[in-house]
Amino acid sequence: MKRLALMTLALMLASAPAAQAAESMDPQLKEKARRAIDGGLNFLRAQQAEDGSLSKSVGITALALRGFLESHRGYNEADGPFVTRPVEFIVSKVNPDGSISESLQNRSYNTAVALVALAATKNPTYADVIANGQKFLKGHQIDEGEGYQKDHRYYGGVGYGGDERPDMSNLYLAVEGLKATATDPKDPVWEKALVFVNRSQNRSESNDQAWAANDGGFVYMPGWNPPEFGGKTDSYGGMTAAGLISLLFAGVDRNDPRIQSAYQWMTANYTLDVNPGTDAKHGLFYFYNAFAKVMAAYGEDEFTDAKGQKRNWRNELAQKLISLQAADGSWVNADSNKWWENNPQLVTAWTVIALEHIVR
Amino acid sequence: LAETATRERAGGRFHLQEQAGAARDRCERAGLNIAADGALDRRQLLAGVVRDGLALVSAAGVVAWALGIAHADTLPSSRLLLVAAIPTLLVPLFGTWRSGTLRTLAIHVATWAFATLIVLCATGLGVGAVPLDRLPVALLMALGIVVVSQLGATCASHLLQSAGTAPAVAREWASWLVTATLWLLAAAPLWLGPLADLGARTGSAPTAIVAASPLVHIALAAGQDLLRTEWFYAHTSLGALQFEYPTLVAVAIAYLGGATALAVLCFLLSRLDAAGGATTRSARTP
């Protein structure tokens, strides 16, 4: 009897941190967030074409599919055509080179997000498709195979599709796809990716590029930002979240100074009103999505911002996203059309995934 | 030439003789012998193609260098695009010394092929790798552009001649007109970028602008996402907007259709020219 009581006590103590984590978010808000997810998923389901696709795009279809499969509803392929048809659409777009894409452009982006969605089905039927997709992403990474040596600023990066210039955003998505499909941690792809990640961080101790500053944030690609963000090398929120996720997924220790300095940048520049580090709303929902993922991966529910104010990111981001939801359950960036954020199917899929990371 | 033509007109020569005289004069200036029936010596025709081709190579080399073909960050696929596109967009300016639809077309295609081959070899040997596996499709697309632009120039030349411009001058003007149009269309993603930005929410402006650019067509054939290359991504907002590239098949059909339509138009215009010339001749014949 005494032994049973001790075991019960031990179990209670062991489960205490988990219970605490689960309560890290306001329960009422959590319920609202779940309802917002349901609204978003209903919107996405209603938008599906006959073949299960959204916007005839593998990328958007895969993101929406991920939203279904990772939701609190626990949807899977047994739940019906709204799950199976998108899967069939994605698989129908597998190319001989292993990429999963409806066009030559965006091949890397589409393949990366498709890998995450197919992995989320947990269906071994797609093992070959996943393995070939991994192979494509690894082959697509800029390295000696493309004639680039380690000292080149493109080295280790991944671009949108063809063999065009790489960027931090596409690398993060590729890394996420490889991580979701359990790529061997010893695979050289990670080490090469870190070369590019290091060169995209404003941290001169780990970045060998002459332009590197020292605020710890990230830029779009080594030495350059898109014109929407001034075209220079100032750190901004979307890419800092992308860079931080890439570091974490590539296996860099949480206490590594690269991660610590990026996290400090993120918390010091925290805002949900604009893309942090800029005064623009371009790529804002991309930021929300990446921010939710990176904060969930980092594992801190609260942080202190630059003004010394304690912030609960789950509560604040959930409130923000719920406030931006349209009556039909969708989200769209009303202030910018850049990076397709005027497409409600894409933005809704991103936001649903963000909310799922918040309530998880 | 214009002065010659004016003098000849003043002398009351027939219109067809004017054309022949102007062409002969131009050929002579170009160092070519012309037979009484208007046929050029084959070797001299070849020499003309080579001479124009070399001039095209020089011009293309300067433009390609200015656009960064030798830059360390230029991707091999971008190098391929420059090799295929620049001679294609410049060739209407060369080989304008010959009249006649099919013959002029043949001279332009030969000049373009010669120049492209030299630019390709020079790039591969002196600048850096060019992905040869994508070259044939890119060059086929470029050939389509050469054919359509040359037929367009011939039509424009006929129209200018029917408006009273001397044949040689009309050919010069037509070649400049077609070249300017080609470059404007090629650069449409740059200078129409702001319009695409405005229209992105409501219409399909970005897709239409992208579809209109011959540079995009060659890039498409070369398997390159042109608008997301570093330079274009930095200089036009189109790369960050939602748009769709046209399919290769759609572009090929458009060029085939355009070439056919222009060939028919050239034929009709040349017939009209001939009829006009005959009318003029019979009116002037005592």
Image (spheres, coloured by chain):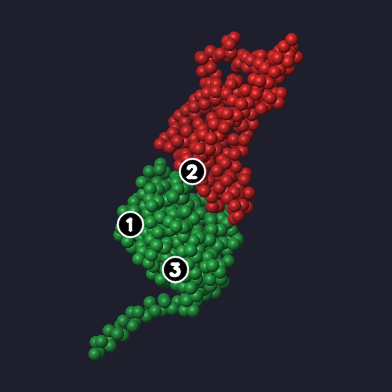
Chain colours: A green, B red
Residue A197 at x, y = what percent? 44, 55
Camera-side mark, 2 or 3: 2
Instruction: Name the kind of residue labelled 3 in the image.
Output: His
Camera-side mark, 2 or 1: 2
Q: Label 3 near label 1: C-beta < 8 Å? A: no
Element under disc 2: loop
- Residue B176 sits in quarter: top right
Relative to the observer, which residue lies in front, A312 or A325? A325
Point out the image quarter for the N terminus of chain A: bottom left
**Disc on the earlier residue, 1 or 3:** 1
Q: Label 3 near label 2: C-beta < 8 Å? A: no
Point out the image quarter for the C terminus of chain A: bottom left
In 3D space, how far apart are the residues under numbered discs 1 and 3 (Cα atoms)?
A: 25 Å
Disc 3: which residue: A357
Q: For residue A126, which numbered disc appears in the image?
A: 1
Which chain is home to disc 3? Answer: A
Relative to the observer, which residue lies in front, A14 or A332? A332
Instruction: Name the kind of residue labelled 2 in the image.
Output: Thr
Q: In the image, is A62 to the left or to the right of B34?
A: left
Q: For residue B247, which numbered disc appears in the image?
A: 2
Which chain is home to disc 2? Answer: B
